[in-house]
Image (tube, rainbow, N blue to C red):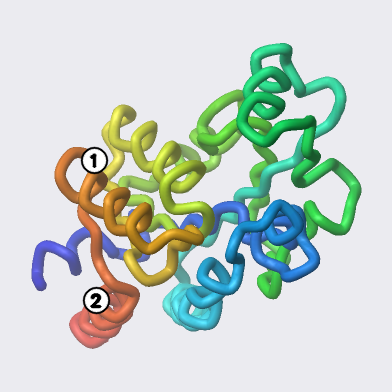
Amino acid sequence: MEWLESKVDPQGCALVIIDVQNDYCHDDGALSRFGRHVTVIRHMVPRLKEVLAKARQTQVPVVHVRMANNELTKSNAYLEHRSRRSGGNRQVCQEGTWGADFYEIEPRPGEPVVTKNRYSAFVNTNFETILRAKGIKTVILAGVTTDVCVESTARDAFMRDYHVLFLSDCTGVDDPAVQQAALERIDRYFGHVVSSEDVVQAWDHWRTRKG
């Protein structure tokens, strides 16, 4: 797909990995303790690791995004919503805890880590400054959960005039119906939903053309 190859030029795209953290992915993490089926979420991690390895090999910039909560970032609106939704003030990705640590994916030196306190990676962070400084025009989005933090970031990226590539098999949520609905929304309104294989092949074709 020529259109895809033009979008994944390593000089103008970035692989953005969102919230692949213990509380969202590990059997002992917060989501699992709350009764969520994290095995479904975790199923995509091996493919994501393959895409990450290919991005590094192709010298595609990688940006890691992590959620981190603390007492200073919990607004009344946030606490009220969490309490209403879960029946209590359940803590997720608390700053400095094991739950906030990355799950099976570690940033390498030189790969920026963006810490966020809200769903979107753009809200009150240096994420866009990093993208602008690197000349990024296309964001390739992966991570968890598909319908919340990854989708929120995709929407904000589109509103800021970035090209959005949303990896269908490297994003995860515990309900397949929710996953499918989110992918359809993104593909209809906010970007292109593509597979990791499509992106890897596009990178390979790009490298072949460049010699």
- Which residue in the rendered view is the most extreme toward the left? 2
Instruction: Identify the image quadrant of the C terminus.
Output: bottom left
Q: Is residue 10 above or below residue 104?
A: above
**Residues packed near mark 1 inside 10 Å, few (<14), some (14 to 19) or many (20 plus):** many
Tell which of 193 and 36 is nearer to you. 36
- Which residue in the rendered view is the most extreme toward the top? 76
Tell which of 29 and 35 is nearer to you. 35
Place of residue 57 in the rendered image (x, y in percent of width and height, measured from the top left): 48, 81
Amino acid type of the residue that numbered disc 2 sits on in the rendered structure: Asp
Q: Is residue 115 above or below residue 83?
A: below
Q: To which residue does mark 1 refer?
A: 190
Name the residue at 61% across, 49% down.
Answer: 65
Amino acid type of the residue that numbered disc 1 sits on in the rendered structure: Phe
Place of residue 164 in the rendered image (x, y in percent of width and height, measured from the top left): 29, 48
Tell which of 87 and 75 is nearer to you. 87
Q: Is residue 143 left or right of residue 81?
A: left
Q: Is residue 125 left or right of residue 152?
A: right
Q: Secondary structure at mark 2?
A: helix
Place of residue 141 in the rendered image (x, y in percent of width and height, measured from the top left): 41, 55
Tell which of 190 and 77 is nearer to you. 77
Q: To which residue does mark 2 refer?
A: 198
